[in-house]
Amino acid sequence: MNELLIMFDWCNTSSGLNILLIVKNILKLVCFLAPFLIMIVTFIQLFKVVMSGKSEDLKDSWKMVVKRLIAGLIIFFIPTIISFAISSLVGEKGFNLLTCIDSATKERVESLKQKEEAQEEAERKAKEKEDEHKQKENFKKDQEIRDKNKQVFEEWKKEHGSNSDIAALAVKLSPTATPEGHLEQPEGNPWRQINDSRLNNFYAIMDATIGKYHDNNAYASCAQAAAGIIRATVDPDFNTAGPRKQIEYLQNNPKWELVTVVKTTDNVDEICKPGDVLITGEGKSGHTMIYVGNELVRTKFPNSNGNMFQAAYNGEYALYPSIDKVTKPGRNFNLYRPTGRGEFKNPFINVNDYIR
């Protein structure tokens, strides 16, 4: 019984009441037209029998007329029968259901619809106000984090000197600092960009500092990724061809000094300073990477233990720039450090737009 009453609770909604109104109108139309159709068909058949002159057919036809008239009357009074059945079945509570059926009018449906739209509009405005409040709170928290990170960076830069711009830009351009977050070019093509908004600034720096290399920049090349950052910060003439060519450039160049050779047994954190370039010609094509230090990395990636900026391409895959954790290099690396000699005017970008 309760289930029946609950089922008709949608009489208080415009959509539910509109369905009931359609059913109600269809039922009225059927109950109105069906008896007339039955009568018309019956009298046509009766007329044919009379015109045929067969008395035995006329007797059967009258019986058929009576049956059809009774059926037509029953159909005509179906609404009344249904109302009586509901009242008897549900009892006094049945009148609630009858009231619901009676209330299924076009005016009632429109009234409920306007009421629902007004309620939805009020709820939407309340939701917008709540979302706006949350956005302001989140922005405030993010701003506090940004201000704190900026203060940490300024203090860090005072301690590490001007070459820290190399490390700062490298970290800012890194899209990820976790091995599982590395971005790979599925086809292993280092010249092709991949659609990831986190790399937009990196692509902009590469296009500005290196320009076209073959049909495009070698975005996922270790030498190109490092060269783009170095050319934007301390050395606009830094070689972009590859690790071995970069070593030739670094040798006997007054802008750079060879600090030491980092062996496979050395701990890079104990030897390197942020902004140092570690480069080797060993292996298939050599490798170039930039030491950034974990302290700076944590200003952007608080949970990272990374300390090195690098990209990679070995003919089989193209690994876009990221921060990696390197404690001991797998090969012997020459450690080069900028000397700061000579005046440097950045012809490519305003670095402060990226690292502040």
Image (cartoon, grey):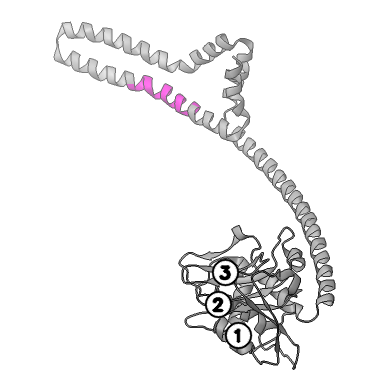
Q: Is residue 349 visible?
A: no
**Amino acid type, callout 1:** Ile
Magenta-colored span: 24-37
Q: Which residue is mark 2?
A: 282
Q: Is residue 319 left or right of residue 174?
A: left
Q: Quadrant of residue 234?
A: bottom right
State the image coordinates of residue 170 (x, y, percent, origin top left): 68, 73
Q: Quadrant location of residue 308?
A: bottom right
Which residue is identified by label 3? 320
Q: Quadrant of the C terminus?
A: bottom right
How far apart marks 1 and 2 lie (CA) works out to 11 Å
Q: Is residue 335 magenta?
A: no
The residue singled out by tag 1 in the image is: 247
Q: Is residue 341 above or below residue 23?
A: below
**Amino acid of disc 2:** Glu
Q: Residue at x 80, y 61 (%)?
A: 145
Is residue 307 placed above or below 103 in the rendered structure? below
Alpha-carbon span between mark 3 and mark 1: 22 Å
Single out the mark in the foreground, 3 or 2: 2
Residue at disc 2, secondary structure: loop
Where residue 229 sits, quadrant-wise, is bottom right
Q: Earlier in the sequence, mark 3 or mark 1?
A: 1
N-term-proximal mark, 3 vs 2: 2
